[in-house]
Image: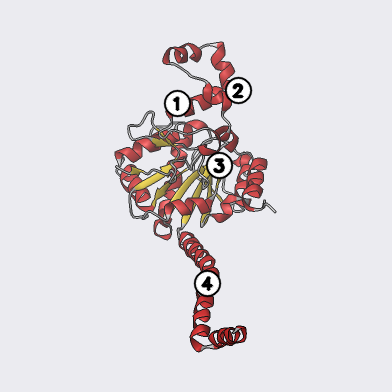
Amino acid sequence: MKDLCWRFRVSFLKSPVTVFFWLVIFVFYGLLFLMTPSTKVQKRAASSSTEKKVRIFCLVLTQPKNHRSHAKAVKETWGRRCDQLLFISSLDDPDLPAINAGIPEGREHLWAKTRSAFIFAYKFLDGFDWFYKADDDTYAIMENMRHLLVNYSPDETLWFGSRFRRFVKHGYMSGGAGYVLSREAVRRLVEDGFGKQKCKRNESFAEDVEMGRCMQTLKVRAGDSRDEKKRNRFFPFLPADHLAPTLQRRVKVTLALSCFLTFGLFRIILDLTGIWQTAWYWKNLFYPEKEGNECCSHRAISFHYVTPGKMREMEYLTYSLRTS
């Protein structure tokens, strides 16, 4: 009886139907194992390829004394990932390259300098999709910027940045964190804003506020640059100031206290420690920001007040450091 059962099992296993059955199972699970990761890789590769097609012209405001320090650091780090990098200065420097905008240096001339930057970029309007204005102490992760912008058409009139809700009804974008304008927004800015003088030409150190007013006048939509978890991507301070704000965030400034501190010793102390500046930030953010790691998107785009040394440090941490 045992011998009969054994012969039956052997004949069953050798039958064409059984062999075909196990072959189908093997092929199915083999494909499931091999193809699924590959498909994910292919999707990531396709997404990355699409993002690379987003052409960005980077306009970085600088000055002659920073050409060999801040501007050089930008060129050697994140600036390499712009499709075109141009520094706006008061002195030509082909090595960077930097152009003389014909505007005197000084904070009171920042708005005029920014206008000159976009007027120059307008000459190359059709060669790029987006135009990113930054400072020479800004650090930007261009791959993350493209990841955001690939979802929008450059033919829409919109712009993105770290958005504040003061001074301008629709908000304005921080100049230090940098802001990025669509091709159509730049067209409207130069042709209507400057050409038809719909935007003010007054001198102002608050270049970002003036740009916000101009964008509102021209009906350029302020885009929401937050990620799917409602975390911000553009930041006007160093990462540590957002990840661990501690005392800087906890300073609550009432209107009465603000008036008192404006002319008081305490205001001077807060200014020197940077607390006043960052307290103003938390109070006037257009979109609330959480504390700790949830403050910032995992696809953060830019930070500000980055020294040349810190810029190279961030470059290393972003692109070279790996876990084992």
Compared with 290, 80 (above or below) is below
Name the residue: 35% across, 45% down: 189
* Amino acid carrying mark 4 in the image: Tyr
Amino acid type of the residue that numbered disc 1 sits on in the rendered structure: Lys
Badge 2 is on which residue?
Answer: 273
Compared to 242, does 6 lie above or below?
A: below
Q: Residue at x 44, y 45 (%)?
A: 227
Q: Residues within 10 Å of mark 4 (few under 14, many from 20)?
A: few
Report, in whole angstroms, how far the alpha carbon at label 1 lies from the one at label 2.
Answer: 18 Å
Q: Which mark is residue 138?
A: 3
Quick one: SS at disc 3? loop
Query: Is 262 placed left or right of 77 in the picture?
Result: left
Cα separation between marks 1 and 4: 56 Å
The residue that mark 4 highlights is 29
- Name the spot of residue 99 as percent of width and height, x first: 53, 48
- Residue of label 1: 283
**Left or right of 10 in this view: 211:** left
Residue at 54%, 49% (x, y): give it. 141
Q: Earlier in the sequence, mark 1 or mark 4?
A: 4
Residue 243 percent across, percent down from the top left: 57, 35
Lower position in the chain sequence, tag 3 or tag 2: 3
